[in-house]
Amino acid sequence: MANGGPVEHGYPHLETVRAAVTALYRRLSCDTVRTFSASVAPAEVAFCDTDDLYLGAQRVARELVRHYRLPDARMIVSFREMTHAASVELAAGPEYFIELNDRFRTHRRDIGAALAHEVMHVYLHRLDLSFPGTRDNEILTDTAAAYLGAGWLLLDAYREDAASSQKLGYLTPEEFGYVLAKRALVFGEDPSVWFTSPQAYTAYVKGMARARRDGQQPPLTAAGWAGRRRYARDRRHAQDPHAVPLPEEGPYSFTAGGRDPLRVSFPCPTCHQRIRVPVRGRVRARCGLCRTVLECDT
């Protein structure tokens, strides 16, 4: 948390940000990511100065739990003096203890931004998705929060003028804008109408310009000989009639291709995450996100 100090700008973590977006799609699947097509609405996390501090913080935390589809997770929010903006105790659950910096007692409109980051820590913990090293893992958390619809709160908490500055999160403002722009290009959603900070809007415009330049780059320009050969092989396998999904039967779909065995894929009825397991008669699986146990005959 930058509070009065200098705010870093530019794209120093861009490669890690791109790796984080790729990791989200690999872990969740494209279908699951698309269930987050609607961002957290400003009215759902609004916090007035007249609201009770603890009840209001619990209400915002519940809204973020609902948005991230963590039905059996309960957030206990408290405040204390600390160096960082917030912290969360990642345990087995279902209760998770979040501590917020005491400064949020008087800066209540930014409580939603701090909780968006900390509840995302819980979400990634339940997914068992992490990057090695504290720095990269925090960048993954910021990127996931922004890409899955709650990170616009973190960018909106960025304010800077000649006398003071404030920024939450580990990404630079332009990197937050870049991730939000990537999301906007996929889902057709414009988060800029929700910004109350003019500096946040400027960072989003810069991030959008960078994201659009990504789409103008020819494919495989940075790939070596091995990468191009692997891409050609994957395209051949994608055109194999055995590699495309067979007709669906109810909520289940079956795929096979290359050296992979036949697998069954079905959505979790609680959180809608796609679950893929090898076909072996009767399948019994536990959803890694909401821990629902599912059974089906394949």
Image: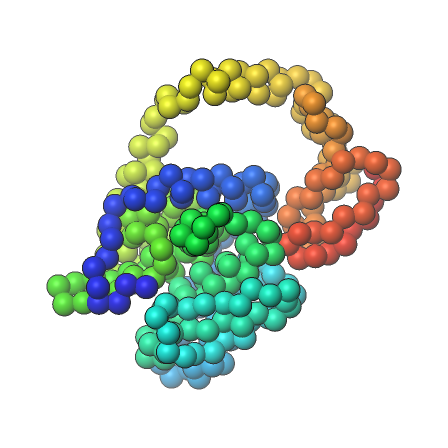
Which residue is most to the left? Answer: 162
Confirm whether residue 287 shows in the render: yes
Check the picture and name the quadrant holding the C terminus.
Answer: top right
Confirm whether residue 194 shows in the render: no
Residue at point 77% right, 54% down?
293
Give how far across and how far down residue 186 sits, in percent.
Answer: 45, 40
**Whether residue 108 is situated above or below residue 184 in the rendered picture:** below
Q: Which quadrant would residue 117 be assigned to in this image?
A: bottom left
Left or right of residue 176: residue 225? right
Give how far across and how far down residue 263 sits, in percent.
Answer: 74, 33
Left or right of residue 89: residue 11? left
Residue at point 21% right, 64% down?
5
Q: Please tell me which residue lies in front, 53 or 246.
A: 53
Check the picture and name the quadrant holding the N terminus.
Answer: bottom left
**Whether residue 239 is situated above or below residue 91 in the rendered picture:** above
Give how far across and how far down residue 224 sits, in percent.
Answer: 42, 19
**Whether residue 255 is situated above or below residue 233 in the rendered picture:** below
Residue at point 34% right, 52% down?
171
Marker count (numbered): 0
Give how far across and how far down residue 225 sits, in percent.
Answer: 45, 15
Residue at point 41% right, 22% down?
223
Q: Which quadrant would residue 17 be assigned to in this image?
A: top left
